[in-house]
Image (spheres, rainbow, N blue to C red):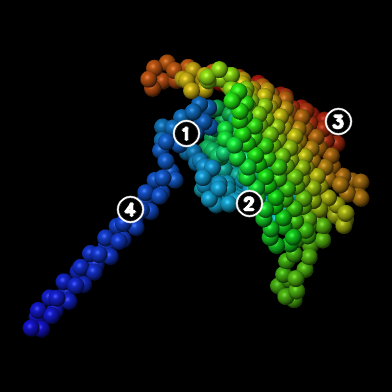
Amino acid sequence: MKKDVRKSKTLSILLTCATMAGYSSTFVATAHAAEMKEFSLDTVVVTASRVQTNKVDTPANIDVITNEKLNTNNYADAADALRDVPGVNILSAGTGGVNMGQDQILLNGDSRVLVMIDGRRVNVASTGTYSSSWLPPINAIEKIEVLKGSGSALYGTDAVGGVINIITKSGTKTQVTAKVAGGSWGTEQYGVSASGSNENGVGLFVTANKNRRGNYSYKNRATGDVSEIANSYYDSTGATIKIDKKIGKDNKLTLAAEHFLSVGGSPFGTPGYVNTASDSYERLNNNVSLRYDWNLAKDNAGFVQAYKNYHHANFYSTIVDNVSDFNEDKYGIEAQQNWKLAENNHFTAGIDYYDTKVTNNSLYENGDNSVNNKAVYM
């Protein structure tokens, strides 16, 4: 009788384990399915080869931050989203209002990263970099493509570390969104976006955003008291607009503009400089572009676009030697054409030209400098 009891207990234990294994298998399968859904093989990218290609067919190390992921994770800004990508580092001199709006983007440890908005170069010519603080707001972004590794063959020496392409939304559907958020030290975030289109094929997408915070506070570990860093505030406003018009079935004309203004205090000095209580900075970006795409849904797609980027950085101080006024105007034009030669063979050719004028008495002996770039790629 005791032997039968043992058999009964053993059988019960085995059934329980089998049941638990069944639940475990179901959980793993569900998690795997969710993971496969997030990393869909049908994801289309354009950055790796300059033409629309399924990510699975792209022979490059490229990550895509989809619109679904941007919405699900409720990122504060694009820099937060980029920090989730393996190999991407954001070097910050401190919290907002302390870093003077110049956080640096690294890809695999290299600062030579080309940043683009809808395929248009926005890097500052004098440094070859672009701060993550100046990227478009989250409510304006459709997706972010991150190409890791050298892209210099396609994009030039700015892309030795890789390429970050911010693809913005269009007015394809009628929608209005709003965001209000708050946090420590008087942090406030406001954002609104609206989009729509009409029967004539005209689409409109606009955004407006404001972020601000008071002086930064910290806890003194020696005394336990909370202290405030004077003159460490920041206040930024931004707006974007995108108007597109369908021409025929597969052609489109797009006008886009971005505005970003950031002001804040400068509580910390640099070696050789002594900051005053009223030192502050201002950064302004005003960009505009006009683009025409043809044969969008065909193998022989192409485009031509012209753009102007303006970047202004001003450091104010009561000490005359500390004052710095930087202005950069960049004019550019690009054109590209793709041909399908055979089922698995494509040929792409294009031109890329930009001319940049920079004025800054602190950097240049004569107060100004220029950068001129001409490129042909195939």
| Position in image of residue 92 (x %, y %) | 67, 51
Label 4 Cα neighbours within 10 Å, binned few <14 / some 14-19 / many ≥20: few
- Mark before the other along the chain sequence, 1 or 4: 4
| Position in image of residue 90 (x %, y %) | 62, 49
Which quadrant would the N terminus be assigned to in this image? bottom left
Residue 183: in sight, yes or no?
A: yes
Q: Which mark is residue 29?
A: 4
| Residue name at image x 67 percent, y 24 percent | 290
Q: In the picture, residue 231 is in which quadrant?
A: bottom right
Q: Secondary structure at mark 3?
A: loop
Q: Is 352 on the left or on the right of 42, as rendered?
A: right
Residue at the extreme front: 199
- Which circle, 2 or 3, is nearer the viewer? 2
- Which circle, 3 or 4, is nearer the viewer? 4
Task: Decide: is 352 above or below 309.
Answer: above
Residue type indicated by callout 4: Ala
| Residue name at image x 21 percent, y 72 percent | 13
Q: Is 5 on the left or on the right of 253, as rendered?
A: left
- Mark before the other along the chain sequence, 3 or 4: 4
- Mark before the other along the chain sequence, 2 or 3: 2
Q: Which residue lies under the disc numbered 1?
A: 44
| Cα–Cα gap, marks 2 and 3 | 41 Å
Label 3 Cα neighbours within 10 Å, binned few <14 / some 14-19 / many ≥20: few
